[in-house]
Image: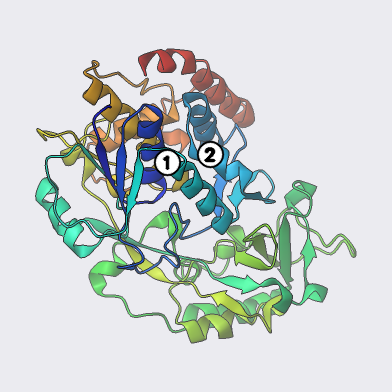
């Protein structure tokens, strides 16, 4: 039997890593502290629980998130195929029924004879080959242990979760189904607002009461999950050109174009609850009900989950990790994967778990380390960023800005297609490296 590996944390990165190790014949002991010790954001004890949103973003190949998925599919990623089994309609995005996805992942892990799930908190590291994938909601004890590796005292930023409302509590006479520019069928429920309705909503939103943050917390807000009220304070049109943009949306019955449009996305396959897209918030619960109730279709909405803000812990990766997510200088094979490693996003976390799993397999087998094509693929570029960001390291998600630019293609759409073709053409080489 091959050497056993300890995976600490049952989130996306930990589960992907465990599946790669199990598939290669390594026994895996996975430690997950829930339900005996909760976090500030999880609502279940399920493995691979999606906390902030049920969307894994676009699958369009001309988007950075779509290109990342295409690369991971080619590399043998395990979780993306399970996510597609649990998908709910959301246009070109890969969104899932959270409960179904979690159950599929747990069932897949349990199908391996040498997988063991241990429900307890790990507070100290030992000399067992280990992958730390405790996620952004790492317990204080483990965060303290990890800080010994990094020498950094402030290893965190703050982000927010959007609320979920009951489908039957929505006023459908003031809403309509449809995708932007008619794409995606009836995947989104659109809640239009005319100018006077929007201006009242905006006025109350920017003056509403929030959960009090300390000054240092305010400076650590993550741009990618900016609370809707903070975004709105940048200007009255900021959210109208962001999550509430009306462009490409018209009421199919009247042809009417609204001044602003809130979009809801199905939260599960049953379609009995909806997520408010882009409405991450730090408003108090009472203010969420009051202010979001000013959206005409949500006047009598029942909130199944209110939005919250929570701390996300991450290491200062350039000082701590190499391009394979291995802890620099560790004698025992030790890796850190997931958002704790400094990647940002669901699929990016899956990627880090996959790479850490591959690297652990190579190290335990005695193979020479492989090199990622850092200047061709999103996977390689993210790994390079994690290990060698020169200044002001912050968590990073997939984007074309981390790739060398393609300058000889002027058309924007054609240029994104060129990024895709350049990357995918390199995958056979990348597979040989693995």
Placement of 313 over or under 237, stated as above or below? above
> What colouring style does the render use?
rainbow
Placement of 308 over or under 267, stated as above or below? below
Q: Quadrant of the C terminus?
A: top left
Residue occupying the point 44% across, 69% down: 230
Residue occupying the point 53% across, 78% down: 205
Which residue position holds label 1? 350
x and y percent of residue 414 in the render? 62, 25
Q: Quadrant of the N terminus?
A: top left
Residue 118 shows up from this direction:
yes
Q: Tag 2 or tag 1, which sits nearer the N-term?
A: 2
Side of 1 relative to 400 (left or right)? left
x and y percent of residue 7 in the render? 29, 44
> Which is nearer the eye, 385 or 306?
306
Which residue position holds label 2? 80
Q: Give the number of the disc on residue 289.
A: none
x and y percent of residue 157 in the render? 30, 59
Q: Tell whether label 2 touches label 1 (CB within 8 Å).
A: yes
| Spatial separation of the CA atoms under disc 1 and disc 2 | 9 Å
Write down the quadrant of residue 236 in the picture: bottom right
> Which is nearer the eye, 250 or 113?
113
């Amino acid at each position: 039997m091959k050497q056993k590996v300890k995976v600490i944390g049952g989130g996306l990165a930990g589960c992907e890593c465990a599946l790669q190790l199990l598939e290669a014949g390594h026994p895996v002991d996975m430690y997950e502290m829930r339900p005996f010790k909760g976090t500030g954001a999880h609502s279940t004890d399920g493995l691979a629980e999606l906390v902030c949103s049920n969307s894994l973003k676009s699958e369009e190949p001309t988007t950075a998130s779509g290109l990342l998925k295409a690369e991971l599919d080619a590399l043998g990623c395990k979780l993306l195929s399970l996510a597609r089994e649990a998908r709910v309609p959301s246009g070109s995005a890969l969104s899932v029924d959270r409960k179904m996805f979690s159950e599929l992942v747990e069932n897949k892990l349990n199908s391996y004879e040498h997988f063991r799930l241990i429900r307890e908190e790990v507070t100290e590291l030992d000399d067992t080959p280990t992958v730390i994938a405790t996620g952004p909601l790492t317990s204080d004890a483990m965060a303290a242990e990890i800080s010994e590796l990094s020498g950094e005292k402030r290893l965190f930023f703050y982000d927010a979760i959007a609320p979920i409302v009951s489908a039957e509590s929505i006023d459908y006479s003031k809403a309509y189904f449809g995708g932007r520019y008619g794409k995606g069928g009836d995947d989104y429920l659109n809640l239009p607002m005319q100018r006077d309705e929007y201006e009242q909503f905006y006025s109350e939103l920017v003056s509403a009461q929030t959960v009090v943050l300390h000054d240092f917390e305010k400076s650590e807000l993550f741009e990618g999950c900016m609370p809707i009220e903070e975004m709105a304070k940048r200007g009255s049109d900021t959210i109208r050109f962001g999550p509430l943009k009306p462009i490409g949306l018209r009421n199919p019955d009247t042809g009417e174009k609204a001044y602003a449009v809130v979009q809801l996305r199905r939260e599960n396959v049953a379609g009995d609850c909806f997520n408010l897209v882009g409405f991450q918030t730090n408003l108090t619960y009472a203010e969420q009900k009051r202010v979001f109730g000013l959206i005409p279709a949500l006047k009598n909405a029942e909130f199944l989950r209110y939005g919250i803000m929570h701390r996300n812990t991450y290491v200062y990766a350039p000082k701590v990790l190499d391009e394979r997510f291995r802890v620099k200088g560790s004698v025992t094979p030790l890796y850190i994967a997931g958002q704790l490693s400094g990647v940002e996003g669901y699929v990016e976390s899956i990627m880090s778990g996959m790479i850490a799993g591959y690297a652990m397999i190579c190290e335990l087998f005695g193979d020479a380390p492989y090199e990622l094509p850092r200047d061709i693929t999103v996977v390689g570029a993210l790994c390079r960023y994690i290990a060698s960001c020169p200044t002001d390291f912050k968590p990073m998600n997939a984007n074309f800005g981390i790739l060398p630019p393609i300058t000889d293609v002027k058309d924007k759409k054609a240029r994104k297609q060129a990024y895709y073709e350049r990357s995918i053409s390199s995958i056979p080489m990348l597979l040989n490296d693995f």
